[in-house]
Structure formats: structure tokens, C-alpha cells
């Protein structure tokens, strides 16, 4: 129960931080709205680095190439995600973004030589039918922002697969700090190229600080929850982000999700939960 509570709260914290970035993008270029929370997040990671494995472990890692590729994948996903929440509702963004488990399963075939039976393929096909329900191609003009979110989901699936490839022997700080530094470098580069550098206004310093703190708390709660509970039972809780997204979008941004988005979300969630259940069951049968 404690692990479940921690994981649910971690996803709520992630959603809250994303909502703050969305709000900040009303005042700043999207790269600035994402960069300054990452700086705050990075500062907290460095402050508590000893608790996360220590900075000395970073240059000693034997997985530098994998860490680099993982960081690039995670940052690309985050850039696309932050761009998307400016233009479409949080509910639609999270619904499409949480197709990542289906992409992970497909990538596992090539990376880990995983073999799938009809149960998994059925779940994956139904999941992408849910995507078609949300997008409705041929019935409404195809929203390019939605395609950006799907690309973000694909990138984060590479991030997840590379995390599995690295394994659980790496100190936590290595898995956390590399992507954060890549985020900071990438967003700084975007601001430099675009000439959009804008320092935070004094009244917004606390906003970025709170946002970075929520990302840090989310990371801690998620790490504790998944390390102390049954990951197969906890993984479906990631779909709570759609619920949090709907509530936060409605309360703070007056976003009312379309019925088609809600229907697609139900199909994707049920398919995703079934996929995770089947993978968990297969793992315990080995």
C-alpha cells in the first residue's frame, strides 16, 4: 500500500510540474519555461547527491555511450512534450504520450529478442486503435502537434529500453543526472539559436523553483515506490497521469477533453494495463 501511494503521488507530482511548465510557457518561450525548472531540479540533485550514490560514481560508469543515447532520447522526448502541452490539452497529450508501453514492447523484439504471443500483439493493436480514435485521421485535419506527442512517446520508449539495457547496477544519480544535464544543454542551445534568452522575472523565480522541486520529489517517490513494491503491479498506475491531466487541465486551464479523446484514452489505458499484466505474468512463469 505504501509503494502504491508513493507511485501515485509521484505521477501527481510529475503532472503538477508539467502543468507549471505549461503555465510558464504563457510568459516565456517554451525552451525557457522548461530550462529553468531543470536548473532547479539539477541543483536539488547535486545537493542530495550523496544520498543518490555520490558524484564520484559518474566518471566511473562503464556505460557512457548508453547513458549518452539514453539522455538524448529522454531530452528529445521532453522537448516534444513541452512543445505539445502549449498547443493541445493535457488530457490529449498524456493519452497519446502513454502509448509508450506499446512502443517499448515493439522495441524489445529488436533489442532483447523478445518473443510475443497473440495476447501482446492484440493489446498493442488495440492500443494503436485507441490512437486512431483520438486522432480520427480522414475525419478531421491531422493535428501535427499530436504527431509530435507520438514521437515523444517513441523517444521515451528508447529511453526506457536503454534504462533496462544499462541495468540496475548503476547508482541512481547516474540515471538521473545525465538526462538533466542533456536537458539543460539542449534547451540552452535552442534558446541560443533562436535568440530567445530571457531571464526569469523576480516574481517567477519561485514558480520555477517549485516546478523543479516537484520533479525532484516525483523522482524520489517513484524510485522508492518501484524499488519497494512489485513493479508489475505498480506499472499500470502510470495511466493515472491521464486522470491527473484531465483534472488539472479542467481546474487550472479550463480544458474540457473531447469525447473522442476520452474514448481513445479508455481504449489505450485498458490495452496498456492488459499488456503490462501479460508481461508481468510471463516474467513470473519463467
Image: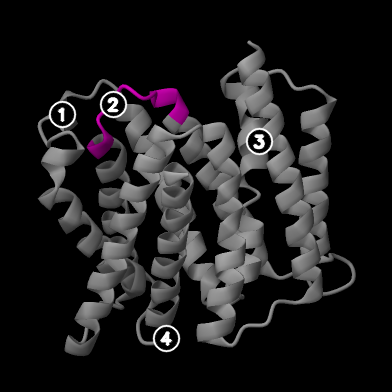
Q: Is residue 92 above or below residue 271?
A: below
Residue 17 on image: x %, y %: 39, 67
Residue 166 on image: x %, y %: 38, 25
Q: Quadrant of residue 119?
A: top right
Residue 156 on image: x %, y %: 51, 46
Residue at 57% across / 19% down in the picture? 112
Viewed as shown, does residue 174 lie left or right of 252?
left
Q: CA distance from mark 2 to mark 4?
A: 38 Å
Q: CA distance from mark 4 to mark 3?
A: 37 Å
**Nearest to N terminus: mark 1 or mark 4:** 4
Quadrant in which the C terminus appears: top right
Disc 1 crowd rating (10 Å Cα; few below 14, some 14-19, many 20+) is: few
Q: Which mark is residue 276?
A: 3
- Residue topped by disc 2: 170
Magenta residue span: 164-173
Q: CA distance from mark 1 to mark 4?
A: 39 Å
- Residue topped by disc 1: 57
**Nearest to N terminus: mark 4 or mark 3:** 4
Amino acid at each position: 500500500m505504501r509503494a502504491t501511494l508513493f507511485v501515485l503521488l509521484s505521477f501527481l507530482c510529475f503532472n503538477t510540474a508539467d502543468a507549471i511548465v505549461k503555465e510558464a510557457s504563457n510568459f516565456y518561450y517554451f525552451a525557457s519555461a522548461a530550462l529553468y525548472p531543470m536548473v532547479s531540479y539539477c541543483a536539488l540533485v547535486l545537493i542530495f547527491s550523496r544520498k543518490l550514490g555520490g558524484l564520484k560514481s559518474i566518471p566511473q560508469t562503464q556505460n557512457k555511450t548508453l547513458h549518452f543515447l539514453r539522455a538524448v532520447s529522454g531530452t528529445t522526448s521532453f522537448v516534444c512534450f513541452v512543445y505539445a502541452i502549449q498547443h493541445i490539452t493535457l488530457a490529449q497529450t498524456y493519452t497519446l504520450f502513454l502509448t509508450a508501453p506499446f512502443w517499448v514492447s515493439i522495441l524489445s523484439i529488436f533489442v532483447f529478442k523478445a518473443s510475443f504471443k497473440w495476447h501482446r500483439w492484440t493489446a498493442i493493436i488495440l492500443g494503436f486503435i485507441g490512437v486512431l480514435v483520438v486522432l480520427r485521421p480522414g475525419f478531421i485535419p491531422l493535428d501535427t502537434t499530436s504527431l509530435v506527442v507520438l514521437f515523444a512517446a517513441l523517444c521515451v520508449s528508447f529511453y526506457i529500453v536503454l534504462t533496462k539495457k544499462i541495468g540496475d547496477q548503476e547508482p541512481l544519480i547516474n540515471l538521473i543526472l545525465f538526462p538533466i544535464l542533456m536537458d539543460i544543454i539542449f534547451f540552452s542551445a535552442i534558446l541560443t539559436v533562436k535568440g530567445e534568452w530571457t531571464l526569469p522575472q523576480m516574481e517567477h523565480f519561485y514558480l520555477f523553483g517549485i516546478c523543479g522541486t516537484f520533479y525532484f520529489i516525483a523522482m524520489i517517490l517513484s524510485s522508492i515506490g518501484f524499488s519497494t513494491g512489485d513493479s508489475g503491479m505498480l506499472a499500470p498506475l502510470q495511466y493515472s497521469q491521464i486522470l491527473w491531466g484531465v483534472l488539472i487541465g479542467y481546474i487550472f486551464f479550463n480544458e474540457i477533453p473531447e469525447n473522442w479523446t476520452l474514448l481513445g484514452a479508455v481504449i489505450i489505458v485498458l490495452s496498456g494495463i492488459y499488456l503490462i499484466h501479460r508481461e508481468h505474468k510471463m516474467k513470473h512463469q519463467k
